[in-house]
Image (cartoon, rainbow, N blue to C red):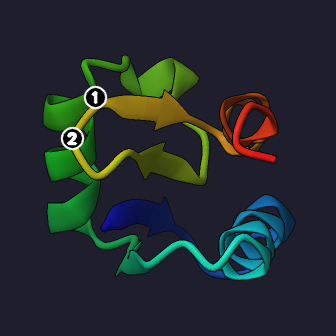
Amino acid sequence: MYQIYIRELCNYCNMAKAELNRLQLPFEEIAQTKKTREELLARSGLNESVLTYPQIFAPDGTLIGGYEDFLDYTESME
């Protein structure tokens, strides 16, 4: 199952979720809170100054990245 870290009022988050749905890929949404933001920073290895939303992880736990990275990732699936 894919995991997608999202934040409120995020157009790129909404577009990424729409793409996951379009491709019928199962995913879990993880909403931004102080705790999940800290978890995301630790898990991704990203610096807080460059952290953007969404951040998407593959089923094996590998960081795919943001929306555009996800489009590149899924391009090979079609």
Foreground mark, 2 or 1, reads 2
The quarter holding residue 71 reads top right
For residue 58, above or below residue 5: above
Amino acid at circle 1: Ser
**Corner quadrant of residue 75:** top right
Neighbourhood count class around disc 2 (C-alpha, 10 Å): few under 14, some 14–19, many 20 upward: few
Q: Position of residue 19 (x, y in %)?
A: 78, 68
Which residue in the rendered view is the most extreme toward the front?
Answer: 78
Give me the disc on residue 23.
Answer: none
Q: Earlier in the sequence, mark 2 or mark 1?
A: 1
Residue at image point 21% right, 41% down: 61
Say left or right for 16 vs 40.
right
Tell me: residue 65, above or below residue 4: above
Element on which disc 2 rests = loop
In this image, 35 relative to 72: left or right?
left
Residue corresponding to mark 2: 61
Q: Residue 9, percent across and down?
A: 75, 80
**Residue at position x 21%, y 42% in the image:** 60
Query: What is the C-alpha distance between the residues marked 2 and 1?
Result: 10 Å
Q: Nearer the viewer, residue 13 or 58?
A: 58
The residue tagged 1 is 44
**Where is residue 3 drawn, in percent x and y?**
36, 63
SS for callout 1: helix
